[in-house]
Amino acid sequence: MKNKLNLIILIVISLNFVEGTPLFSEKGYIKGIVYSKETGKPLAGTSIRIEKTAFGAIANKKGEFIIRSVKSGNYTLLASLIGYKQLRTEITVLANDTIHLNLYLEEQVIRTEDIIVSASKRVQSVQEVPVSIANISTEELISRNITKLDEVLGYVPGVSMSGDHISIRGSSGFAFGIGSRVILLLDGFPLLSGDVGDIKFDALPIFDISRVEIIKGAGSSLYGTNALGGVINIITKEATEQGSFKARLFSGIYTKPSYKQWVYSDKLHTNTGIELGYSKKFSRLSINSSVYYIEDQSYRKYNDSKRFNFYTKLRYDFASTFNAGLSASISTNNRADWVYWHSLDSATFPSSGTDLSNRALSDKYMLFADAMKIFDNNNFLSLKSGIYTTIFKNTYPTNHSDYRQSDAIAFNNELQYNSKLFKDILLTSGINYTYHEVSSKTYGNRNQYLFSVFEQAEYQPLMPLIITAGFRLDYEKTQIAKSNFEFSPKIGAIYKLDSNNSIRFSSGRGFRAASIAERFASVDFQGFKVIENPNLKSEVSWNFEIGGNSSIDLNSIKIYTDLTFFFTRLSYLIEPTFSTNSYYIKFDNITDSRIFGLELNIKGYVDKLFGFETSVTGIDPRNLYDNRTLKYRHNVLWYNKIFIPYNCLELQLEYRFMSKVERIDEELKLQVRDYDARVPIHIVDTRLIFKGKEFNFPLDLVINAKNLLNYYYTYMVGNLGMTRYVGFQIEGSF
Amino acid sequence: MKKLFLFMLILLVSCDEGLNPGTNRNIATRAFLTGNIYFVDGKEGWPPTDSVFAVRVVAFKNYPPTDIINEILSGNAFFTFNSLPLFVDSAFFSIEIKDTPVELKYIVVAQQYSDTITAQRAIGVYTETGDKTRPSSIKLFPGDSIFIKIEVDFSNLPPQPF
């Protein structure tokens, strides 16, 4: 079936991928230069797109761009660059003619007008999307000295991390490292492991990230399984003609803990890394490549790691209406196999009996190809196909009782067609085929596949009103288990009261098919036997939100406010259950719950003085079986940031608060000493940034302190959060 | 804006350092139950090695208890987290009791006989009379540290309550 499907896809694609196919002949060109309105300097890297089409370009070093083969007609041109206001320009393209444009972008200190591709699988403005969105820019990643993507997600309003588990507005708790209720994509390609269904954050490049888009709420109508609580899409950078070579070097120390019981070594431990990146567009060929090596000695004994990642993306423009790309990455991680602390008295030491010579070794390989064919301004076809392999083992002999090993392949194919129906309805249609194959000592030799079709329509009946509606149908079949059908509809609307105020509404369904690990785990885990449960049902969520935002511009003071009320109903949640009679652990569909919540986000900037951001998310997560609060949830998340720019310097101060987790699994009492040691979380980070590149100096410098006040907390049971880290970072572009 | 700054400043100054090594201990209410376990027939009296995975002391508030795991999970039993030394003549133990005053009505030595933590059997019981069918109880008050002795005879096990 896999081969047949691939053949059909290839035939369909190849029919029209020939240069010069005269699907339309009345073509025009758009040429132009983008400048800063304030300084008059050209703005390299500006994205210029024709709205509601797949046509676009990136401005080169001189700010120049060209868009070829545009059918004659009237269009809206959208120019966007981080740090600048979006510019919309109405244009008329004539056949065999070239339009020359000079575009002037105005600086914007509060980012509210980013572009996004994840909400509808096509480029659109955030202001046209009826769901809650968060965007993280590459500047935020680099200035925070982020070395793994999960480190930055904790700064996003409404998002919290419990180990490697992402929880968006309380969608997820701690699930023993298995399953993810948020789907992670790299340029739209899913990166969840085939066995455990989790996110491997150490497999992701950092240098090549342009931005990270986060959709809060169910996204299964477009993305299928795992998009139960939200979608995270990492968008990589596009190469420009001037090219760039970038290097980043960072190093820092974990300061000694305040309590002598927690000092496990006389020397200070470091986190050091180097990252190199190169990108350039050569005529039709674009190349992006980056490589990093990071050695983290950690703030805890037996928690060190050595990580390597290589990422490359090649893109070739066969014609102005046809391009294709190939992305690949290789990641390795050699880390200590830390699980829990010894006790609160010895919070930086591993649990007693831990074999300090054992290492956890993992490799991840990603190979992903995509192609896009533009038929005309409203019709384009795209294909994504790729494979993601995860290999894990520890260093025990294969006949040792604690030997663990799992190799998994996730194969994903998607064919998407964007078109226009009548005058105002934009359609996004597609089919998807996903196949997982696992060879594991723990889970056996298993496979799972999902076949899906999806359709989404966007309709603009009135100028200020945009309505979206869609659905996705998924068929899931796992070896020897019952098959599942999932129907995931969604509807949303956004109404712009004026250019500064809008209200939105959305509702949709999400689901997560049980992973192979949850169905077939058969292992002795710290004294408990875990047994199989192949016929698990999918987890389901129904999500509803209503919100609005407003921008106020009082000359030198600019304030942006967004308020959202959300409600989520979660059913058939899969959790490990402890049997009282038969003495085993089994993953089962047990929890039925609901989450009410409110999220307020305010950003402000006082011209040339300072800027700030504050956001509060309050949730009431309740298990409907026992009317108690859900386990492992923070009921209040509060994020604050103040930044003070002064010439080439900027001082940033961030404070994050997470209320104390009210409930955890009491069964952990048997495995973890002081399992119930937990407190509200207060984390202060600060950094001083020297922005040399903005002043023709080739280097940016950052001095940063994470957890400045050295506040001690647990981020999950038996795990002390990171103690104070002080470091520096040098980044240069050449 | 100034109010926000001020509020954050107050919050930051007022918040303590969070967890510390003593966070989970309420010194005012804690006590210790300590003791020695004597194995009759010494090292030679132990069962085969493939049936001894761990030996722990468990002190129950209730007698008879339902089972070890549920009593621990519901907060009605205290236990030595790690196994005592195996295949020895005698072993020392110490259990921190956090919520005193408390009466411990049944104190046993439990053997885990397979790799499943729930596979437990009683191999010794605390009794002041020497009659293994009549366990003795102990009352602990804040600050107490009581030392007891328990005898384990693998050839003459006490009644199995679990």
Image: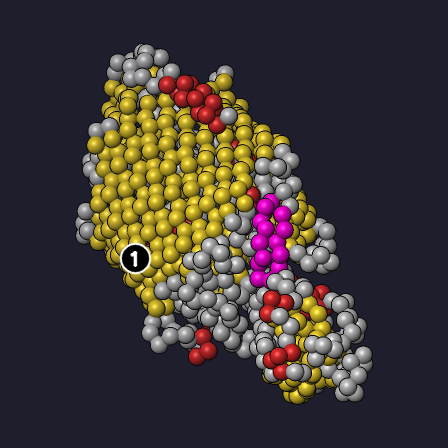
- Going by the image, does A439 lie left or right of B65? left
Q: In this view, does A503 lie to the left or right of B101?
A: left
> In the rendered structure, which segment of residues is drawn in magenta?
A519-532
Confirm whether the magenta stretch covers residue A528: yes
At 67% from the left and 63% from the top, the residue drawn is B118
Left or right, residue A442 beside residue A653: right
What is the basis of the colouring in this image?
secondary structure
The residue sitting at the front extreme is: B44
Q: Classify A696 as above or below B47.
A: above
Q: In this view, does A79 lie above or below A681?
A: above
Q: Where is residue A274 in the image (x, y as percent from the top left)?
A: 27, 55
| Residue B130 seen anywhere in this rendered image of the structure | yes
Chain ID of residue with mark 1: A
- x and y percentages locating residue A474 in the rendered image: 57, 31
Q: How crowded is mark 1: few (under 14 residues within 10 Å), some or many (20 or more)?
A: many
Image position, residue A254 (x, y; %): 37, 68
In the rendered image, residue A559, in percent from the top left (x then y), is placed at: 44, 48
> Residue A388 or A405: which is nearer the viewer?
A405
Residue drawn at x 28%, y 26% is: A317
Label total for image: 1
Q: Is residue A538 magenta?
A: no
Examine the image and state in which quarter residue A655 appears.
bottom left
**Residue at x-position 36% and y-position 51%:** A332
Residue kind at label 1, given as amino acid type: Gly
Residue A85 seen in the current view: no
Placement of A300 over or under A416, stated as above or below: below
- At 49% from the left and 43% from the top, the residue drawn is A439
Q: Which of A686 and A159 is in front in this view?
A: A159
* Residue behind mark 1: A273
